[in-house]
Amino acid sequence: MQDNVQNFLKTTVEQFGVMTQRMGYEHDLAKNRREAYGIINNIGSLTNRNKLTATSKIVEKPADVDLFLSLPEEMREKYVKMKLEKYSKKTTQKMAQKTTQNLGGHA
């Protein structure tokens, strides 16, 4: 009986440890997303719409946020514009596909 209780307590402590790590990770991600937006918001050459679009694209993936925050300050604006350009191309391609579909496959 005592072994069962000890095993239960050990498992519970381990699960709390995992939960604490996950909560810390999520907190760090949220902090990094806010930091990324703060930086992007200060890029004067972007419209508000571009700032929001770029932020939403960059924060979609934690690896993109990490990369963005690790870049030297002078490279960040270039990275944001690269992301916006990539997004714009994808959006244009999707619109062209929909137009082709609406025309019955005849462009």
Image (cartoon, grey):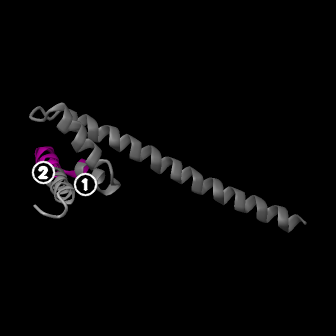
Decide: marks 1, 2 in contact (CB < 8 A)? no
Q: Quadrant of residue 48?
A: top left
Q: Measured from the top left, where is residue 83 in percent x and y?
A: 17, 51
Q: Main secondary structure of the magenta part?
A: helix
Mark 1: give few (<14), some (14-19) or many (20+) Cα within 10 Å. Answer: few
Q: Amino acid at mark 1?
A: Leu
Q: Measured from the top left, where is residue 70 in percent x and y?
A: 24, 51
Q: Measured from the top left, where is residue 3 in percent x and y?
A: 84, 68
Q: Would residue 74 be counted in the magenta stretch?
A: yes
Residue 65 located left or right of residue 101: right
Q: Secondary structure at mark 2?
A: helix
**Circle on res. 67:** 1
The residue at the point 12 percent across, 35 percent down is 46
Quarter of the image with the N terminus in it:
bottom right
Q: Nearer the viewer, residue 3 or 59?
A: 59
Q: Would residue 61 be counted in the magenta stretch?
A: no
**Circle on res. 33:** none
Q: Nearer the viewer, residue 87 or 40?
A: 87
Task: Please say if 33 is above or below 89.
Answer: above
Give, as a single range, the part of the protein colored magenta.
69-85
- Residue corresponding to mark 2: 85
Q: Secondary structure at mark 1?
A: helix
The residue at the point 17 percent across, 64 percent down is 105
Q: Nearer the viewer, residue 97 or 57?
A: 97
The residue at the point 27 percent across, 54 percent down is 64
The residue at the point 11 percent across, 32 percent down is 44
Task: Please say if 56 is above or below 3.
Answer: above
Mark 2: give few (<14), some (14-19) or many (20+) Cα within 10 Å. Answer: few
Q: Amino acid at mark 2?
A: Glu
Q: Measured from the top left, where is residue 55 in percent x and y?
A: 26, 42
Find the distance from the CA under tag 1 to the CA under tag 2: 18 Å
Quarter of the image with the C terminus in it:
bottom left
